[in-house]
Every structure is written in C-alpha cells, then in structure tokens.
Image: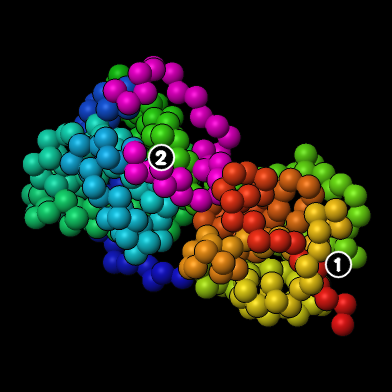
Amino acid sequence: MLKKGIAIKLGLAMLPVIFVLLFIFAIAGASMMSGENEVEVSAGGCSPIGGLNQEKWSEGIEKAGVFKGKQNTFMMVARKYGIDPVLFAAIAMNETAWGTSKAVAIKNNPGGLMDAATGMATVKVFASLDEGLDAMGQTLHNRIIVDGLNTIEKLGNVYAPVGAANDPSNLNSNWIPTVYSIAEKLGGLTMNCAAEVGSDIKIVGDKMNYFDAVLQEAKKYNGWSYSWGGSNPDVGFDCSGLMQWSFKRAGINLPRTAQEQYAFTQRITANEVKAGDFIFFKGTYGGANHISHVGIVINEKMMFDSNSSGIGYHDYQGAYWKSHFAGFGRINPK
C-alpha cells in the first residue's frame, strides 16, 4: 500500500470556483475530440480489456496539446500516488481543454491548483509540466485515497457540484459525463470500476466442492482496487494474493505467486473445466512465457480475479485475455 502523502491544501470551499473557471475550456476541449454534444458512457466506464489499452492511451495523449509525449509521466505519477492513470489523465484533459489552456501551456498547471502564496487568488505556477503533473497527482491521491472519493461521481460531487451558487449556467452538470467520455477515449478506467455483478452471473455445469466457500470470501472484496504485492485485507490484494487468501478461508493452502500456483495445479482442458478451477495467463508483465496472472473460473465466460481494473468479475473471453491465455488448472488431489 502506498503511504498517504502530505496533502496539498486545496480548500474544498474553493474547489467549485476553480473548476467552474476552468470548465469553460474543458467543454470546448471535449467537444473538439468527440464532435458530439451528448455523451454515451458504457456501464462503469471500465476498460473492456481489463487493463490499460496502450493503443488508445497513446493515441489520445498524442493529440492532447502540451501533454503530447507525456504518457510515461502520467503513468509514473499515477503509480507513485496509487491512482488510476486513465482517470488522472481524463481529469487533466478536462481541466485544460486537452492540453491547450493557458494555465497548462504557460503556467504548467494541469489541474487548476491555486497558489496559497496569493491567498488562493491566482493559479499556481510550476517550473515544469512534470512538476505540475506531480502536484496534481498528489492532490488526486488526497481526494481519492485519503478522502475516499474513488469514483468519477464522488469526485464530481465535490469538484463540480450541480446547483452550486457560483454556477448559474449549470456548467458543473457536464463534469461527470465529460470525464467519463474522455476516460473512454483513453481506453477506459483501470481502477475502482469493477461492476457489481449479481444474479446475472450463472454457474454453468459442475463446480468444485470448495467453490462456494472460496467465492463467498473473494466476493467480500468485490470493487476493491488492485494492490501490487497485496495478500490480505489490510493491504489489499493482487491476483495470486486474492486466490491464496480466499482458498485459505476454505481450508486450502496455496503457494503465493501466480507462477507457483500454476506449478501447484494440474493442467486440464477447456472441456474439463468446472467453476472453481483456476485460469492462468502469461506475459501480462515480465517475459512472454512468464505466468503472470491468475483468476478463479466462474463459468465459460467469466472469472473472478484482481487485476488493474479492480477486484471483481471479468470476461476472460475478451481479446486481451485470450492473447495471454496460458491454461486452466485444478488443485492436484495429492
């Protein structure tokens, strides 16, 4: 888990003013990219491939004014502060009319941060765009991680509250759908967007005798963010950590990593798979053949796992997961 950084004091009372002022430019920027006045958003705004869509991510940022070439900077700052790079970039694009506003072009300020030295009367000037992005990332960390405003809706209700006295033209009502729209242009959110899935997820065919107990435990963390190296509720879960923890609650001890869990299980064919078996993937990081991800099979389409889009139900039949598929596994009955 990332340590909570020292907050950049951006008074909540000032936030509506800041975002109303900058939002005038944001509407123009969003319209330029979409060519539409109405925004259509898919459920949850999640990346359909379960992670960062590199093609859309790079393409979107390359078209974004002063942000051109800053893909890695967004990624590094997001990783540093434990926030979704897509959400981070989407808000920056919204606040700067896709990297073209004077605040970002002249003052290197991508987030509308105000200068405490002037009593919050002027926009803060940063020495470089990287410095401005870092400051914005820290501020978003404080709002998302510290304050728990971990969805676009929650952030919008603070940053651009609908009906605010200083928003007579109701521009704030556009903040949430516009950020969603930009996030989708960048490939979709990768954190805090795992959809709640209930009775529409059907178990088809047989299931392992431990399946109900394992899934009951795993579902307690549905919607949680992915946590690299995490293996318990205190710090969160990565993919293999979630499997190890959930299976242990059902009385089954697993090794720690996805690679070790792959070796611990026996290979089975798709025709043999039951709910509760493992599904493994390779090359999502590390070498091309490195077993890098694991989930538990729910049915012929869905798995439950922890990946960069969060903990929850995910479609393993999508193109991304198919391209990294390594095989199914079953606990070896020793």
Residue 282 has which mark? none
Residue contact between numbered discs 1 and 2, judged by CB atoms under 8 Å: no
Image location (x, y in percent) of residue 56: 40, 40
Could you tell me which secondary element the residue under label 2 belongs to?
helix
Q: What amino acid is at disc 1?
A: Tyr
* Vertical position of residue 160 compared to residue 296: above or below: above
For residue 73, which quarter of the picture? bottom left
Using the image as rendered, state which of residue 164 and residue 4 is in the foreground. Answer: 4
Image location (x, y in percent) of residue 232: 61, 73
For residue 252, which quarter of the picture? bottom right
Image location (x, y in percent) of residue 169: 30, 19
Image location (x, y in percent) of residue 123: 13, 44
For residue 200, which quarter of the picture? top right
* Vertical position of residue 11 compared to residue 146: above or below: above
The question of residue 51 being in magenta is answered with: yes
- What residue is shown at x 37% (from left), y 68% (from top)? 4
Sequence-wise, which precedes: disc 1 or disc 2? 2
- Asked whether the viewer can see residue 300, the reply is yes
The question of residue 189 being in magenta is answered with: no
Q: What amino acid is at disc 2?
A: Lys
Spot the residue most to the front.
289
Query: Which residue in the protein does label 1 denote?
Result: 210
* Vertical position of residue 207 compared to residue 68: above or below: below
Q: Quadrant of the C terminus?
A: bottom right
Residue extent of the magenta highlight: 32-59
Residue 56 has which mark? 2
- Asked whether the viewer can see residue 183, the reply is no
Q: Is residue 251 left or right of residue 100?
A: right
